[in-house]
Amino acid sequence: MPVEPMPMPVASLKDEASFTAAEIDRFFSNLLAKPGDSRDPLYEAMCHAAIDGGKRMRPLLVRAAGRLFDVPEERLLRAGAAIEAIHVYSLIHDDLPCMDDDDLRRGKPTLHKAYDEAIAVLAGDSLHDLAFVVLADEATHPEPQVRVDLIAELAKAAGPVGMAGGQVMDLEAEKMGELGIEDITRLQQLKTGALIEYCVEAACILARKDADARTPYRGYARNVGLAFQIADDLLDVGGDEEKAGKRLHKDEDAGKATFVSLLGEERAREQANILVEQAIEHLHDHGEEADLMRAIARYAVERDR
Amino acid sequence: MPVEPMPMPVASLKDEASFTAAEIDRFFSNLLAKPGDSRDPLYEAMCHAAIDGGKRMRPLLVRAAGRLFDVPEERLLRAGAAIEAIHVYSLIHDDLPCMDDDDLRRGKPTLHKAYDEAIAVLAGDSLHDLAFVVLADEATHPEPQVRVDLIAELAKAAGPVGMAGGQVMDLEAEKMGELGIEDITRLQQLKTGALIEYCVEAACILARKDADARTPYRGYARNVGLAFQIADDLLDVGGDEEKAGKRLHKDEDAGKATFVSLLGEERAREQANILVEQAIEHLHDHGEEADLMRAIARYAVERDR
């Protein structure tokens, strides 16, 4: 269902987010149709985790960045869904008893609570594969080189040089203690930043932008990723569990170093705001077609969940 | 290090297997070089699971099939390493306490025993990503379309319509009981068959064979996959734990239906031998360049581990 790109006023961030969430739900509903055999519980579990949940900030960011280059909506949606599949798989595995041991996610029981741990491991693994199935399909882009680039960069952003590597750094940090601000920045750039940066990278790949042309958008994404993480740390300290739909005060309780524990709330908030301004500055060559990108950057720190 | 393909006598199966195992170890050693930061335990864990272990039957099968079509060795090795990365990740997750809860694998402590469960989950996830990183690299094949095809088929073979789906069928079977021979066949075609079939499919994709030309090789792989699984069931009942390097009698202890529990040992062995003969029959258009394929088919049922 291609929708023509057009410049959006800032006021419509909420509408754009709702539209994106509905499109992602529709995409996953089709992708995860039950096969009608004994694998049905696997598909039900994937739906529990992937449908009707989350802010869908990553797919929204893909759409916002793709709008700068007039990339067709259907391609942006597919890339966004692949990223969201990776994000959801990582949350499922993160919530397992051997990892963060969480009972609540997006206001619902975590997957190993709603089903069992074995299904949770396999539903995560399955969504992990489906991300690549989605990107490899020619509906994502007619040029195989574009699809290979999307796949290679996503596998890097998700794997040991990206998200999974950052998660291990985080586990090790709990053992070592005493991280500095540079360590935390590096850790978060891998753990959450790599996949957020990939959202903008994916739009650039779909638009066939070369490495030089991607530089400002990478800068934007890096700043937004860090600002988003600082906001997450602030919400962990001062947020509302009801709104967040998950357990808070986790870092505090675990005695973990975060941007907030190192800088204090006020300086952390200042730092997040500076990062947002820097992110927006990277978009100075663009007019109102970048307003959604600007609104997302502001939302990253202003959100209450 | 490309090696020219040449016809091999059956006697050299052992040499070919040793050569393949050494090449796969070398490949993983390079791929998994430690980054020298707090992610080192992740890389050590991946090496523990991926290096110096297993029969490497899947990469050997890729090399054997590729030899029929003169595919360069380096490309076959890369495809074989990607498949082995998926196989190893599935073993790591399979061994977890919430799944099969095994302490021993390939004669070594399982990964969650040697490290911990969190690292085991993340090492599996990381190897899962690296399989796609390896395939997406142009060293695997200069044509992007070939790499996309390799990636799409591997993600299907590993995901909910393949291996992961078969694992869930297996979990559900324990709850439902009373599977028939057709149910077991379908379950095993997904759980272990899909990845074994992909080994031969990958060689066909690298050789740019069209769907029609792939038919006999698919038939070979399907027969070998089932014969391999029946042999596994026979080893679970009558094998030597020392040689196997893992716990046996698992299916028996769990009261699970297998080819052996349904057919009895003698008929199961007969059935495996018939499948091997059928597999070899699919190669009738080939001369001695297919001798390694034939030797692998026989080995699938004659092995003692």
Image (cartoon, coloured by chain):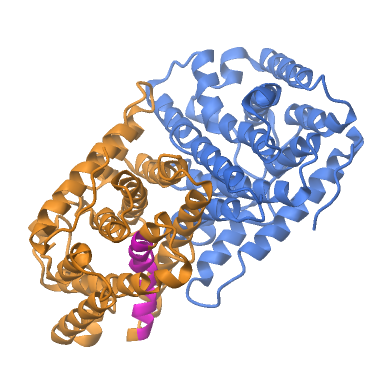
Chain colours: A orange, B blue
* Viewer-side residue, B258 vs B214: B214
In magenta stretch: residue A184: yes
Residue A178 magenta: no
User: What quarter of the picture does the C terminus of chain A occupy?
Assistant: bottom left
In the image, residue A131 above or below residue A227? above
In the image, which residues are magenta? A182-200
Q: In the rendered view, would you say B180 is above or below B61?
A: above
Relative placement, left or right, of A34 versus A26 is: right
Q: Which of B89 and B246 is in front in this view?
A: B89
The residue located at (15%, 58%) in the rendering is: A8
Does residue B203 appear in this view? yes
| Image position of B257 with respect to A187: above or below | above
Q: List x then y, in percent, for residue A170.
A: 37, 70
Q: Is the magenta stretch mostly helix, strand or loop?
A: helix
Q: Quadrant of the N terminus of chain A?
A: top left
Residue closest to the eye, A220 or B40: A220
Quadrant of the image occupied by residue B122 = bottom left
